[in-house]
Image (spheres, grey):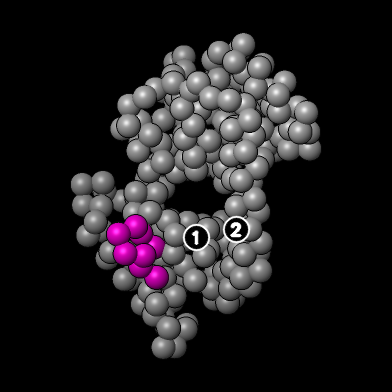
Amino acid sequence: MINILMIEDDPEFAELLSEYLAQYDIKVSNFEDPYLGLSAGVKKYDLLILDLTLPGMDGLEVCEEMVRKYDIPIIISSARSDINDKVEALALGADDYLPKPYDPKEMYARITSLLRRYSKANNTELSAAKSDFELKGDTLYFKKDALSLTPAEFEVLSLLVKHQGITQSREQIINTAGTMSIDSQGKSLDVIISKIRTKLGERIPDDSKRIQAVRGVGYKLV
C-alpha cells in the first residue's frame, strides 16, 4: 500500500481524491491544519500532496519546512494561479505542481510517475553513494575519512550526496543550505562548490569534477 500525506483545508475535496485513490491501494491521510500535518510522522509516508492556501501558515512555508527536514516527494495541489507561486514552489524543492481543478486520474498518474522516479533515484543512491559517503551526525565521511567541511560546505555536499546522480538547481541548493546568504547566492555557491571539489580531489586524484556543473541549472554529484 502507498501511504500519502495530504495537507488540504477543503475536506470535501480531500475526501473525493482519497476515495478515488483508494481503488489503487493508495491510502490518503489528510490534515486540514498545516501544523498538524508537519507533526504527523512524515517519515512513514511515501508522498505529500500539499495545498498552498492554508489556515495559519502559507503552503510555501510548509513546503520549505518539509524539504528542509524530510526526503519526501511533494506534489503541490493548488487553485492559486499566480505563476510566481508555481516557480517558487518548484524552487523550494517541490517535485510537481498540479493546478486545481483537476481530474483525479491526472493526480494518480503524477503520483505513480513521481514515485517511480524516486525509486530509481534511491536505487542509484544506495548502490553508489553509500559505498563512498557516510553521514554520522554532523560529520560526512568519504571512503571512511572524515571530511573537514565548513557548515555551508557540509549542507551543500550532504544535499548532493542525498540526491546523487540527480541535478539540483541552484535555487534548491541555496534554499536548503540555511547558512548561505541569498544576497550573494551566485558567488557564494560557486565558491563553496570549488572548495568542496578541492577537498574531494585530495581523496580522488585527477578527479576534481566529481561534482559536475549542469549549465544553466545547477550541480550534481556523479
> Which amino acid, mark 2?
Ala
Q: Which residue is mark 2?
A: 121
Q: Which residues are magenta?
A: 212-219
Q: Position of residue 33 (x, y in %)?
A: 55, 17
Q: Is residue 68 magenta?
A: no
> Which amino acid, mark 1?
Ile
Q: Which type of secondary structure does the marked residue at label 1 adopt?
A: loop
Front one among 179 and 95: 95
Q: Which residue is mark 1?
A: 166
Q: Position of residue 222 (x, y in %)?
A: 49, 71
Residue visible at 39% across and 22% down? Answer: 80
Residue visible at 36% across and 24% down? Answer: 81
Task: Identify the image quadrant of residue 20.
Answer: top right
The secondary structure that dominates the magenta segment is strand
CA gap, disc 2 to disc 1? 7 Å
Could you tell me which quadrant the N terminus lies in? Answer: top right
Q: Is residue 21 visible?
A: yes
Residue visible at 44% across and 21% down? Answer: 79
